[in-house]
Structure formats: structure tokens, C-alpha cells
Amino acid sequence: MKPNEHAGESGSTLVCAMCTILILSVIGGNVLLNCTTRYNVTSKQIKGWKDALCAAEAGGDIAYAETRKALKNPTTVFTGPGWSGDQANGPWTYTMPDPIGTIDPATSKGSLTASVTVDRLPASAIVTTSPTPSASPTPGFYRIRSVGTARVSGLRRGGMDDAMTAAGRTNFVAGSKARGYGDSLLRKIDFQFDHFIATYGDGDGNNPHASPVPVDASGNPLAQVSRRIELISVPVLASTGDAIRTSGSFEGPGSSGVIDSYDSKNGAYNKDIAPSSSPYPAFFSDSRDANVAVGGSTFIDQTGNIYGNVTTNGATLKPQLDKYIFGTIDNTVTQTIAPQPRVTPPPSRSYEVDPTPAIIDPPSTVMVDGVAQPPNSWANAPWYHYTYFRNVIVNPVIVGGTARETYINIVVDGANNAVSIKEFLHINRGANVRIYFTGDVDMKVALFKNLNQDGAPLNNIDGTTSTNVSASNHVQFYGVSPPAGVTQRVDLDANGNPGIAAVWYVPGADFEAKGNINMFGAVVCKSFYANGNCFFHFDKQIGLGAQATDYRIASYVEDIR
């Protein structure tokens, strides 16, 4: 064979190789272009989906901040920029004045907006701001529904990212398989109309209609994606869960004293299931919830044990103090205690007896708004008026020779303005008594008797079983707020080694317990002092006063329709 027989054909091989490379490059470039395009579409949709939730939560935060004003600045609630609606009754709506987020080239504005609707839950859910029967309600519970909307730029098409279908991955929303996985779920993008409003209206099925999406300067529809969340804002009840709450200082318990808790639904307090007992008996867990909340920076522990959490507003308590405090310590908590308003009977009610009796035998029926009612609740309780309160016996209603749970209101606001219990005050079993006073309390505890029993209530007047299992909750003292600059006093003198079961809501009073006192119940006061062998046992069945001091988010859900 001649050496150079095929020398003239070498260029054809090079051309074939280059053509092959070109074809492969075109295929690869096309694949890359398609992948990049679809990736960009998908990534923009995913970004819009996440941004929409951020916008919805921002709207929810704005509305929640408004509900928190309801307790301190009610006249300013839902009145700021963007808010509209019936100021007194709602519902209220908020529309973000200007879009936020990344500038949208089509509009030269932010790409995110939020709109919110707030309405009040039914009156049956509203709590009262104070323990008085005639107290006005708080603003109650609010439902916040927030819609966050994000612009979706790029081609008006759905992506192809179904990565969420991988094994072990969850859907965006549990149970959404019928609507697809991953990017398929993002086909909720609104290209022409808001699909949610068209199908569900306001979310409750009211007024579904075709709601076009916004358009740009040229009249072209702007694709968008929306997410919706619902929040429930509820009042925080300040005194629930606290054994002792003060707006000022705290000193106690005495060096040999104890502050602990129990649950009266399980019966009377039993020292054998107290925190120091071992081994742990039944109901032991109920003994360590005696929280102490101090609104000031003065906290003096007399080395008595506190079996619960302690919060102060600026004290210098250190975690090392858990030698005596068997719970958490937080020195950065502010406390707000609502004052007890002046108390008078409702306009349709008059005092039952005048002059005041030494023995209260409540009537079997009381006229309430012209209708005879048994005294089977605080709303139907008879009212008694005293100018000076001492040597009083309170009885329940007797039905068929048996005492029944009976409710009685007593007001002490005479010229002397004092509750002096230096002789005796007897609350016989079955009597539920609220004592409202405008002066001071000076009590010899040995002369006070609350004969109700924890965990063993009597039947109601109609024969049904009473749910008030707390002996302490049967006797409630309320200090009517004194004039500005005046401080009430509550002085409990042991005079022996007795026990006293009662609830004390005295926000304007210095509360002082001296000597070997066993106290059962709960206390809200201005300042608290206890010395000696003072034992304080908080009854967990007491939700004292239901004082709303703030709001919190109790529920958060996303509407996934």
C-alpha cells in the first residue's frame, strides 16, 4: 500500500467531529436553557410562595399589636393608617398603605402587600375585667385573618418542580395530595382572578365573586400568589396561676415558713403530700405551683421555701437562690394589677336589710329585674350593707332541712370604713360570700371561721351538684380602691395557730400576716409581708379576679384552601 494513499481524506474526519460536537453542544445548550428557564420560573414561584406567608404574618402582627391596645388605650384601637370599619363593634379591616419588599419592575413598587380583617368573637367568650358582678367586659377575644400577597414575575406559566414528591418528604400541607405535590400545589397562582375569593368569598362563604388581579401600567394582569393565616388573640388573665401577686414589694415567707400549692378538687390540703414529702405520693405534682409575681424591685426572702416560680420587675434575685426557691426566677417581668372599682348594688337591686343584721339568713328568692330568682349565683346574690363589720354570722339557704350553696354580697363602706374582725366572723358551710370594703382590715384570725370544705361542696339550691370545690373560693375579700395617695392595710394576726381559707383581691393594700398562720387561697395586693411560721397554701382551683392585662396569640393556623 502506498504511504499517502488516503492523505487527501483527513479533512473529512475533522469536519465530522466538529459537526458532532456542534450538534451535542446545541442539544446541551437547549437542555440547559430549558432547565434554566424552568428553574427560574420555579424559583420565582417558590420565592413568591414564601414571601406571601411573610406578608401575611406581617399583617397579622400589625393587627395583634392593635388588639393589645384594647386594655390600655381602647380609643386608639383600629384607628391608625390603613384601618377602617365600625369603631365600636367591628369588623375592622386593614390594608397596607404601600407595598413592601423587593421593587416590582412592572409597578415600580414593593412586591408584597397585606390585608387584614379583625372581628370580635361572640359575647359568650368575653371575660370580665374585675370580679364585681356589675363590671364591664373587656374587649374580649379577637379573630385575625390576614392575607399576604406576592407578585410572581417572569413568564405566565407553571413550573415543573415536583421535588416534594421524594420519599420521606412532606407536602406543603398535610393531606394535600389531591391537589398535587411540590410545584403542582403552587398552581394556586392567580393569573387572571383571585381563585380564593372566587370560590370562598371572605373565607366564610360570604360573597364569592370574580376578583381580577391588579394590572400594570399597560393593563396587563400581574400574576400573584396569596397565603392566608388566622390568629386568635385572647386576654392574658394576670392573676390566674399565682399564689401571691403584688404591684410593689414582697417580703416573706418567714424563716420557718413555706409557700406551696394544692388542688382542692382532690380534697383538703394534706401536709403528707407537701413538696418536702418523700417518697412522692399521689398529687405531689400539685404542690409545686405556688408562683409569686412581684411588680416592684424589692424582693426579700426570709429563707422560707417557695415552691413555684418567682418573677420580679428589676430585683436582683439570682438563680443561686433556688436553695429556697424551687422554680424559675425572672427579674424582667412587669406586673399590672387592675384596681378594684367602687362597688354599689346594680340599679335594679336594693340592700336586703337595714339596719344590718348580726346574723345573715339570706332569702330563698331575690328580685332581679322584677323577676324572683333564687340566690344561686353571684348575679342573683342579695346585697347587705354595713357601716361597721364585726360579730357577724352568715348562713346559707336551707332547703328541706339541708344547707345549699348560696351566694351573698356584703358591702362595708360606713364612716369608719373598716372591717374589724376582732370578735368573730363565721361563714357557715354552703355560704359563698363576697365582702367589698373601702377601709382597712384588722383580723384576729382565730376568731374567723370558714366552715366550707375543700373537695366537698354541697348541692346547689336546685339540687344539682355544685362545682365550687374550693373552701377558699367561698369567702372572697375585695378592697375597693382607695383615693390617690392612700394605701389600705390588711393585718392578719395569728392569735394562736389557726388557719384561714379565703381569697384576697386588695390591689391598693399593704398585706401583712403575722405569727403562725396557715393561709389557704390566693392574694393580690400592693405589697406583701409575712413573718414567723407563716404557711401559705395556694389553691389551684382559684382563678382570682380574671384580670386581663395583655393579649396573647392562642391559635395560629394557615387556611390552605
Image (cartoon, rainbow, N blue to C red):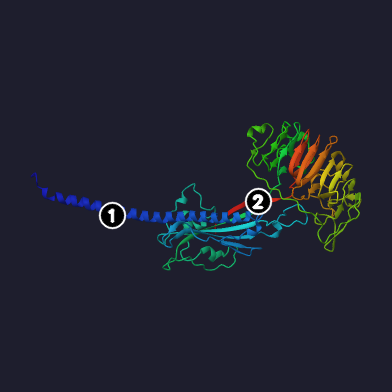
Image height of 537 relative to 204, above or below: above
In which quadrant is the N terminus drawn? top left
Q: Count of labels shown?
A: 2
Q: Amino acid at mark 2?
A: Asp
**Residue 9 image point, x, y percent:** 13, 50
Q: Amino acid at mark 1?
A: Val
Q: For residue 160, say whether it is visible.
A: no
Kindly state the secondary structure of the residue where label 1 is placed: helix
Q: For residue 169, say whether it is visible.
A: yes
Mark 2 neighbour class, 10 Å CA radius: few under 14, some 14 to 19, many 20 or more: some
Disc 1: which residue: 26
Closer to the eye: label 1 or 2: 2
The picture quadrant where one finds residue 347 is bottom right
Please state which of residues 247 and 401 is positioned toward the viewer in this rendering.
247
Please state which of residues 139 and 223 is positioned toward the viewer in this rendering.
139
Task: Give the side of residue 273 with respect to residue 7, left or right.
Answer: right
Disc 2: which residue: 550
Task: Give the side of residue 249 with respect to residue 365, left or right.
Answer: left
